[in-house]
Every structure is written in C-alpha cells, then in structure tokens.
Amino acid sequence: MRLASVARESDSRPLPAAVEAALAPQTQLEMPSMPGQPAEARFDLAVNAAPAQQVFLGIASGTRYSMLLHPEVAGGITVNLKEVTVPEAMDALRELYGYDYRIDGNRIYVQPLTVQTRFYSIAYPSSLRQGTSDLRVISGSIADSGARAGNSAGNTAGGASSRGGQVDSSRVTTSVASDFWGELRNSVGMLIGCATSCPDGRSVNVSPHTGMLMVRALPVEQRQVNEYLKAARVQVERQVMIEAKIIDVTLNENAQSGINWALFNNGVHNASKGATTSGFPVPGAAPTSATMSSLLGVGLPAAMGASTASAGTFGLAFQTKNFAALINFLEGQGQVQVLSSPRIAAINNQKALLKVGTDEFFVTEITSTPSTSSTTSTTSTGISTQPFFSGIALDVTPQIDDADNIILHVHPSVSQVVTDTKVLQVGGQNFELPLAKSSVSETDSVVRLKDGQIAAIGGLMKRESRDAGSGVPGLGNIPGLGWFFKNTNKLRQKQELVILLKPTLIKQQSDWMESVREAGARIQSFSPPAASPKPTPDAAQ
C-alpha cells in the first residue's frame, strides 16, 4: 500500500522544465523559400528631339531587357520623365507618340507608326433578329359602301388584321432590330476614321460566319478598337433569367372592386415584408403614385409600369424575392389559379418570346363567283381561313445597366378563342356563319427593377356570367309545366389577371446551377401516384 501511494505522488509531481524541453518533439518548421521577381530599376529620362531608335536603346541600356526595334521605327522624341521603370517609360511613349510594343520575357519588341493588321475573335451568332410587339384597340367605322360597325381587339398572338373601314383608336408598337455585325463594322469604322477601306491602307472587314474581325489601322487606333471590344463584350454577354407567374384570381365579395395591394403590408404578411403600414382609407380604391410609396414602403417612382393600353392597369415592385408570399396574399383576395409559370433567359437588349397554346383556324371570308356558259350556270365558292391563337404568350426585352438595374419591356397576353355561330338573313335566306369570338387580356408595360425584385402587373379585370340550372329529372322537361320543377340561377363573378415578374442576373456559372437545382426540386415535388402491387401467383390461388 505504501508503494502504491508513493507511485501516485510521483505521477502527480510535475517534471522539471529541462526534462520537458528535452522530451518535447521538435515543432519548428522551415518555410520554403520563394524566389521573388527582382525590383525594377528606376531612372530619369530627359531628351529633346532625339531620334526614336536611340531613345529606345537608351531605355534598355543597363537593364535586364533587350530592345528589338523594327527597321521602320523613326521620328523624334521629346520627353522628361522622373523615377520611372522600363515598362512605365514604354507606356508613356506609347501614349504620347503611338509606338506600339510588347514584352516577351526579357525582350521588348517595338513596332513603327505604320498601318498594322490585327484579327479579333467575336463570339456572336451570324443572324439578323427582328421583333415587333403590337397592342391595339380597333374601333369600327361606317364605310361608304355599306354599314360595318363593330369593336374588336387585336393581339400579337393571332388577332384579326385591320381591314378597310377600321380605325386604330389606341395602339402601341415596339420594334426591335438587331444587326450586331453591321453595327460592329460601323462602330469600328468610326474609331479608325474609315468605314470600309481608305487610300492609306486602313480598312475594316467582318466575317460573321467565322466570327472574326479584321482591322488594318495605326497602333493607337488598334488600342482604341481593343478597348471598345472589351466594353462591348461586357454588355453583350450579360444575361438575365426571368421568372413569371400568370395568375387568374376570382375575386371574392370583399374584393369586387379589385385586388387591394395595400393589404400586403398588414399584420398577416409582416413577416414577408418586414414592415407594418396601414391600409387604404377606401378598400379596393385605385391607388395613386403619391400613396403607393407610403402604403407599400417601396420606392415606386422607379417601379411604376407604363401601362398604355388600359387605364386600370398598374405595376408595383416588391422588395420580397419570394413568390409564395405574394401568392398567399392573393389567396386572401379570392380563388387563385396559376395559369402558367414560364421561365426564360434573355441576353441584354435581346427580345425573348414564349408562347404556349394552340392555333385554330376559323373562316374569315367567303367569296362567291358566278360563271355562265351557253348551257349551264355555275357558282364557285372560295373560303378564306385565318389562324387564331388560344393560350399564353409572353414577350420580354431586358436592358441591364452598370448598376445592375433591369428595365423590362414586357408584353403578356392571355387569349381564348371560341366559336360563335351567327345567323344572318340575306336576300330572304338564312346563313349560319361560324365566327371566331376572342377574349383577350393583355398589357404592354415598361418596368424598372433591381436584381431579384418582383414586379406585379394587375388591373386586368373581366366579368363573367353564366346560368346554373337544376330541376327534377323528367318533370322539368314537361312542356308548359316544366318550369314549376326547375330553377335557374345566374352566377356573376369578377376575375383579375395578375402577372408577377422576377428578373435574376446571371453573373457566374453557379447562378445557372442554382436555377437547375430549383427546377429539379419542382419536378420532384410532382411525384407520380404509387402503382398498386400486382398480385402474386400464390395469392391468386
């Protein structure tokens, strides 16, 4: 027992410092040495009308650089530089006198002030793109040849064309033409002062199929062309992913005058906005731009949509990046039905068009041509048809500035075409004409958003009425007495079309991967129903 206690005391007693230092492992590590670049020598350079070749050779004298001069390098140089290195002196002479040079290791190649040929690689399609977005309201007029009065609406997705006797009471047309290679030729030609070819040998030639730009110009002009191409490439290659939700809201009894967007900031949706404000004094009243900012808490002067086709259409921009918060808010205004959720990517200043639906042909014109011969008379009939589009079309053109603000020209359209049979009496005969009846909800707006901000375009309202009948089977069909055993209710409801837009800038490859992951998650959420197990042979017996 005494030996055990002595052993425990010896274990708890600390070791001397010299012993611990001797037993401790060596932890000192030697860092590998990295040879650094030698410091550039600095010198003063002061010359007055000195030959260019002597100046360049003097700059490289006593340094690690070798100066290689083109035989045509000539001219006089006057300069006074203090405390400069060889690259800094060469940059200064290039900016002042235009002598181009390049450094390859320890060698400096100097080019003369003559026309040089350079090739630039341009990655851009060799196609010409043209697009037109058209929204119009056609009012009928009475022509001298006959009475033709009506009211119809044309749309870019297959509306009726304007004919004689029709007047456009309101129309918005936006045209976009993209001739990248033609604009590139003109811009580079203006930089060098020569559009195609000049007597001094300067010229510009583009090859869209090979993606090459050939420029023959002076060195200083070649540098300007290179800077222009770098700046143009940054703007042309910018992309934006546009997510849209086209929602049909059947308004409830409390929202018959329209969706009250001010309620988005009340206590129910504070978590999605992070702010609490009061609602409109008059629920459902049309908001003004003065009250929008105070009630919604967002900067609306930069987000109001320029609605040109409907006075009741307006646009809002929300700071939230979550579609679910806005859809939950709309569910409190009525029954929500998401008609479409398109996603489309577009390059800066390039029109993108998405169309989902069907084209159905309808008879638009019938011609009758009688022909008479010596024995018989016949009549030939000609029928003209025209396609009418039913579905959803989304036309978007983005423009991205240096501050990542996105200006969207958006033209959504939701159309439905059905057959409407008209009976006309001409010359004592009745004619049944199956005509096209089109119901269109569309708007043409320009909105300004930030990256990831959601814009809401609303105010596209329509009223529907239908008859809902019920009765006792059999008895309701008795002539004269059937109306005692059945009743008919006329149902009226209002619907408002809401378009939600969310642009997201594509800045790097990870942005594409994030979009792909989100799409994959949505696809997996729609899992197919589980198949019922097949009976085994033993169970069947």
Image (cartoon, rainbow, N blue to C red):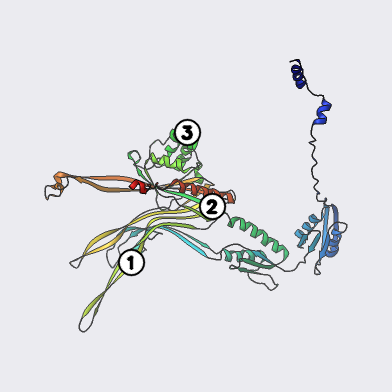
- Looking at the rendered structure, the kind of residue marked 3 is Thr
Q: CA distance from mark 1 to mark 2?
A: 39 Å
Label 2 environment density (alpha carbons within 10 Å; few <14, some 14–19, many ≥20): many
Image location (x, y in percent) of residue 157: 40, 59
* Image-based side of 372 in relation to 308, left or right: left
Residue shown at 69%/74% (left/top)?
Answer: 199
CB atoms of marks 1 and 2 within 8 Å:
no
Count of number-bearing discs: 3
Labels 2 & 3 near each other (Cβ < 8 A): no
**Residue closest to the far right:** 62
Asked if residue 535 can be seen in this view, the reply is no
Q: Which residue is mark 3?
A: 276
Mark 2 or mark 3: name the one nearer the start of the chain: 2
Residue 212, by quadrant, is bottom right
**Three-letter amino acid code at the position of disc 1:** Thr
- Identify which residue, 201 or 234, lies in the foreground: 234
Q: Amino acid at mark 2?
A: Val
59 to the left or right of 197? right
Q: Nearer the viewer, mark 3 or mark 1?
A: 1
Residue 385 is labelled as: 1
Mark 3 surroundings within 10 Å by alpha-carbon count, few (fewer than 14), some (14 through 19), many (20 or more):
some
- Name the foreground residue: 256 vs 293: 256
Disc 1 element: strand
Mark 2 or mark 3, whichever is nearer to me: 2
- In space, the residues marked 3 and 1 are separated at their CA atoms by 56 Å
Residue located beneath label 2 in the image: 240
Position of 163 relative to 378 (above/below): above
Secondary structure at badge 3 equals: loop
